[in-house]
């Protein structure tokens, strides 16, 4: 199952974007072997970002374990690692060593700041990476502090997704050239890339370098969230005039009253009017009124409500596996659909089976145990 069936990926255990990338590839059919630390966390069956894997646990301080990883790399198509720059080289598992064993290996590196640059060796988290790209500054209300958008922009959109795309591009190229390469995926680079449309608007004079005057930052009255009478919220986004007209019609307003609605000077009055209107009914009343229309208005659902929404249920956007609700694989494929693995491995539970499949004999396994490498 899945368009990546037949690919073997080695994933050095980590947190955040690396496992997210591995989940995407496993969902799409790749065989992903997670290399856990022998003394690392035991694993969690409910951590579905680890779904679809098998786990081999090794002590990478052991030369025997390093050699075992190199043998695994000989039969792999790609590798994912998320250590600080230089760590893999110190372990004896850097790209030059691995690709000497397997020239077609695609070597994926996931970091916050990249493999070089003044900050390459510095610690950081999602909000730090998006802070330096302009993304975090742009998210927030006027006169208020910037608001971290969870850790979706740096870790996952600009990190794990970017690495998955880079790996697939390099794997596609390797099919023709027979040569692998290093994919340097930095979250700061990915976050900057995600900002390309905003920088483009700025270059065309359609985005000002301040908050409170731009149409997509929550300041425009027709692109914001509104409280309802029950304390719940609506997302209101009829940017285009035809959609704005639909909203006005449903609200009993005359759209012709707002000829200058694109002007920031007109926004406070219109926002005040919409604020008062939306406070007169419950969220679900409004959702029912706008359902099926082009008003671009949707209820803001919490994480328990979202999986039960009729559209989510109809598409199977969420899964319930063993009582654990989780997002389904995406995107959809007409002929080779992806599939969410039903099993999340515990640390090292597949060590013997995976190594045996990769050509390790019983004597090899005994030797690794004697060396305390596995």
Image (tube, rainbow, N blue to C red):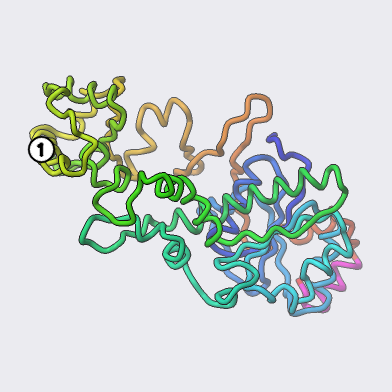
Q: Main secondary structure of the magenta part?
A: helix
Q: Is residue 191 left or right of residue 253?
A: right
What residue is rendered at 63% in x and 64% in y?
13
The stretch drawn in magenta includes residue 164 = no
What residue is rendered at 85% in x and 71% in y?
67
Image location (x, y in percent) of residue 55:
69, 59
Any part of residue 353 in sight: no
Any part of residue 246 in sight: yes
In this view, the residue in front, 276 or 193, is 193
Image location (x, y in percent) of residue 256:
15, 22
Q: Residues within 10 Å of mark 1 (few under 14, many from 20)?
A: some
Q: Quadrant of the C terminus?
A: bottom right
Residue 143 vertical placement versus 165 (above, below): below
The magenta segment is 363-373
Residue hosting label 1: 279
Q: Is residue 208 left or right of residue 364?
A: left
Image location (x, y in percent) of residue 249:
17, 20
Instruction: Determine which quarter of the picture holds residue 373.
Output: bottom right
Image location (x, y in percent) of residue 257:
12, 26
């Amino acid at each position: 199952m899945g368009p990546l069936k037949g690919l073997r990926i080695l994933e050095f255990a980590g947190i955040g974007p690396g496992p997210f990338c591995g989940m995407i590839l496993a969902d799409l059919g790749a065989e992903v072997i997670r290399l856990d630390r022998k003394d690392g966390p035991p694993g969690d069956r409910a951590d579905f970002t680890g779904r679809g894997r098998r786990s081999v646990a090794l002590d990478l301080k052991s030369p025997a374990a390093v050699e075992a990883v190199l043998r695994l790399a000989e039969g792999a198509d790609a590798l994912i690692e998320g250590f600080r720059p230089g760590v893999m080289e110190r372990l004896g598992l850097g790209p030059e060593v691995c690709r000497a064993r397997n020239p077609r290996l695609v070597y994926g590196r996931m970091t916050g700041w990249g493999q070089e640059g003044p900050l390459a060796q510095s610690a950081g988290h999602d909000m730090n990476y998006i802070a330096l790209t302009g993304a975090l500054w742009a998210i927030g209300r006027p006169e208020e502090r910037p608001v971290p958008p969870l850790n979706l922009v740096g870790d996952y959109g600009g990190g794990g997704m970017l690495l998955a795309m880079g790996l697939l591009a390099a794997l596609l190229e390797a099919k023709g050239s027979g040569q692998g390469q290093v994919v340097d995926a930095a979250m700061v680079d990915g976050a900057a890339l995600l900002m390309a449309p905003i920088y483009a608007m700025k270059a065309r004079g359609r985005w000002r370098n301040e908050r409170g005057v731009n149409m997509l930052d929550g300041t425009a009255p027709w692109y914001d969230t509104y409280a309802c009478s029950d304390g719940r919220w609506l997302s209101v986004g009829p940017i285009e005039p035809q959609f704005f007209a639909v909203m006005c019609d449903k609200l009993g307003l005359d759209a012709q009253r707002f000829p200058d609605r694109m002007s920031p000077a007109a926004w406070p009055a219109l926002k005040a009017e919409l604020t008062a209107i939306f406070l007169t009914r419950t969220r679900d009343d409004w959702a029912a009124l706008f359902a099926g229309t082009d008003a671009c208005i949707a209820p803001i659902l919490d994480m328990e409500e979202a999986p039960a929404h009729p559209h989510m249920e109809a598409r199977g956007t969420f899964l319930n596996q063993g009582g654990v609700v989780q997002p389904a694989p995406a995107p959809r494929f007409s002929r080779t659909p992806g599939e969410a693995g039903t099993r999340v491995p515990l640390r090292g539970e597949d060590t013997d089976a995976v190594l045996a499949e990769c050509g390790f004999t019983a004597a090899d396994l005994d030797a690794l145990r004697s060396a305390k490498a596995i």
